[in-house]
Structures are given as C-alpha cells and as structure tokens.
C-alpha cells in the first residue's frame, strides 16, 4: 500500500502573511524512502509563463516506511495569492518522497485579508 496524506491544522486555507501554518504529513510506503520533505511553495498558472518557488522546507531524514509527522512554517510577507483572467498565483504545502519524487499537495491562499486578490474587477475609486 502506498499513500501520502497532508492536512493543515484546523483545515485553514485562507491565511495572512506572518501567520504560522501547521499541519501533519503521513505516508505509508512499501519500503522506507531515503527522505521525506514537506515544502512550502508558490506557483503561477494561466497564460503567463509558469513559475514556481520553494520558500521553505522541513526534511525528515531516514524515515520509516509508515509514519506521521507534524510540521510548521512561518508564512512570508508575499507574494500574495491572486486570480485573474490571464494569470494566477497560489500557495501550497507539498509532501515529497525522495528520491522518487512522489508527492501530494494542499493548496491555500496567502493575502492581507486572507483571500486572493482579484484582478477581474477594477478597484473602487472614491
């Protein structure tokens, strides 16, 4: 049986810069991997050139074939999540098994209001 599971404590998916993101990673593999990483990353999508960055990571060296581990990250100030008709930026926590690169991902939003910035509407002018 092979399985990778990630969850964020409190099922929080709308977060603000500077907050602490905590969660739990678990895996059930046929044999022990060389390492398991939990990565904090952002990525772009849409018609823009695709880009991705790993901002931070927690590495579990010499893990057992089946384990459950907690992790936490201090969220950076940006970039903020956004959505538009041509491009979008989203954040994720990824669970990656090394060396074979199997992974699982949980996406979340990072922004000053805890929601993505919408590029679909012009800002209101006063």
Image (cartoon, grey):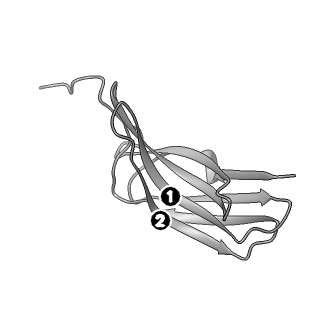
> For this rendering, which residue is in front, 82 or 17?
82
In this view of the protein, can residue 122 be seen by the observer? yes
Q: Earlier in the sequence, mark 1 or mark 2?
A: 1
At horizontal 54% and vertical 60% (from top left) the residue drawn is 39
| Number of other residues with Cα within 10 Å of mark 2, as a class: few under 14, some 14 to 19, many 20 or more | some
Q: CA distance from mark 1 to mark 2?
A: 5 Å
> For this rendering, which residue is in front, 79 or 44?
44
Residue 37 sits above or below residue 82 on the image: below
Q: Circle 1 sits on which residue?
A: 40
- Per the image, label 2 sits on a secondary structure element best described as strand
Quadrant (top left, top right, bottom left, bottom right) of the C terminus: top left
Residue 69: horizontal and vertical position, in percent? 71, 66
In this view of the protein, can residue 12 be seen by the observer? no
Q: Is residue 16 left or right of residue 11?
A: left
At horizontal 43% and vertical 46% (from top left) the residue drawn is 43
Residue 56 sits above or below residue 86 on the image: below
Residue 77: horizontal and vertical position, in percent? 33, 57
Q: Circle 2 sits on which residue?
A: 56
Do residues under tags 1 and 2 come within 8 Å of each other at their CB atoms? yes
Residue 118: horizontal and vertical position, in percent? 33, 30
Q: Farthest residue toward the left?
A: 126
């Amino acid at each position: 049986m092979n399985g990778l599971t990630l969850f964020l404590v409190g099922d929080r998916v709308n977060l603000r810069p500077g907050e602490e993101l905590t969660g739990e990673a678990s895996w059930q593999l046929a044999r022990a991997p060389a390492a398991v990483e939990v990565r904090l990353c952002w990525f772009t999508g849409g018609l823009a050139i695709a880009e991705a960055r790993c901002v931070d990571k927690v590495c579990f060296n010499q893990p057992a074939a089946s384990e459950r581990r907690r992790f936490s990250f201090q969220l950076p100030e940006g970039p903020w999540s956004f959505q538009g008709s041509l491009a979008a930026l989203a954040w994720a926590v990824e669970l990656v098994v090394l060396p074979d690169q199997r992974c699982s991902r949980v996406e979340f939003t990072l922004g000053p209001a805890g929601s993505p910035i919408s590029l679909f509407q012009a800002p209101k002018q006063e």
